[in-house]
């Protein structure tokens, strides 16, 4: 398997079924009970900040970002990041991370949060969130609760229970509109 045939595209509704199948295969039925899934149930993901990798038109990997709130802080929850079994370990995950992080920055997000393996995400700029700063709707191993700050200080404003931003009491816009990337941007 080589990267030559892989294309990176902004996500569209036409990709939804394939992304769902990819996530079902990677995470199984247990995915519905995960903390991050519970947050994502609170509202839509950011279609404009979500991307797929395709090969000959078929979705082989996906990354999504979702607006979140915690106290006065606002940010993005990254995930799921899923790479199809036949396409792992050739750099697709890292490329999707780079594309999504750049899109997050361009949209004006201050911080990106995720639940995942520190050995993978650490070299990509993520580090452990101080224990006790954030609470998730389901228990999470604190070693796996990670963040990458885009705007200095943005993480410290995130305090307490993490919810979908639409579920926050003070539901306000915090992303720049019109940031949807063109295909040229992600090629
Ligand atoms: C984890 C995942 C997204 C990585 O994507 P990928 O495209 O296979 O990985 P990349 O090609 O970008 O990077 C490969 C490198 O990451 C390492 N790596 C992969 N998964 C890792 C993990 N869970 N922990 C630490 N390192 C990991 C590989 O060993 C490899 O290291 P090397 O470059 O030193 O050889 C992918 O394996 C996947 O979808 N797994 C199943 C779903 C999942 O666990 N998603 C993440 C939720 S936290």
Image (spheres, grey):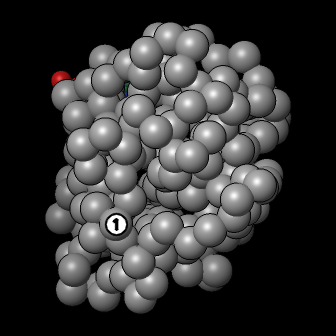
Residue at image location 62% in from the left, 68% down from the top:
172
Whether residue 102 can be seen here: yes
Quadrant in which the C terminus is drawn: bottom left
Q: Position of residue 12 (x, y in %)?
A: 55, 80
Residue 86 horizontal side relative to residue 91, left or right: right
Q: Is mark 1 within 8 Å of ligand 1?
A: no
Q: Is residue 171 above or below residue 94?
A: below
> Crowding at label 1, few (<14), some or many (≥20) Cα neighbours within 10 Å?
some
Please, is residue 161 above or below residue 63 in the view? above
| Helix, strand or loop under label 1 | loop
Q: Position of residue 92 (x, y in %)?
A: 30, 50
Residue 16 on image: x %, y % = 66, 70
In this rendered view, identify the residue nearer to me: 125 or 30: 125
- Quarter of the image where ligand 1 sits: top left
Q: Nearer the viewer, residue 124 or 176?
A: 176
State the residue position of label 1. 108
Residue drawn at x 52%, y 51% as measured from the top left: 74
Can you tell which quarter of the image residue 103 is in? Answer: bottom left
Q: Residue at x 64, y 17 (%)?
A: 140
Image-based side of 2 in relation to 78, left or right: left
Establish if 73 lies above or below 162: below
For residue 125, above or below residue 171: above
Locate residue 42, reporting x and y percent: 79, 54
């Amino acid at each position: 398997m080589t990267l030559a045939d892989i294309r990176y595209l902004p996500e569209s509704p036409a990709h939804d079924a394939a992304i769902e199948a990819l996530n079902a295969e990677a995470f199984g039925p247990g995915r519905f009970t995960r903390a991050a899934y519970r947050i994502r149930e609170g509202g839509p993901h950011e279609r404009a900040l979500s991307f797929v990798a395709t090969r000959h038109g078929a979705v082989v990997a996906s990354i999504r970002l979702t607006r979140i709130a915690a106290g006065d802080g606002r940010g993005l929850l990254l995930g799921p990041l899923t790479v199809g079994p036949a396409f792992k370990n050739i750099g697709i995950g890292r490329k999707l991370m780079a594309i999504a992080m750049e899109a997050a920055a361009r949209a004006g997000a201050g911080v990106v949060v995720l639940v995942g393996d520190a050995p993978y995400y650490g070299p990509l700029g993520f580090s452990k969130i101080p224990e006790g700063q954030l609470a998730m709707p389901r228990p999470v191993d604190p070693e796996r609760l990670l963040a990458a700050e885009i705007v200095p200080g943005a993480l410290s404003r995130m305090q307490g229970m993490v919810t979908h931003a639409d579920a926050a009491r003070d539901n306000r816009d915090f992303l720049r509109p019109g940031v949807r990337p063109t295909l040229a941007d992600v090629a």
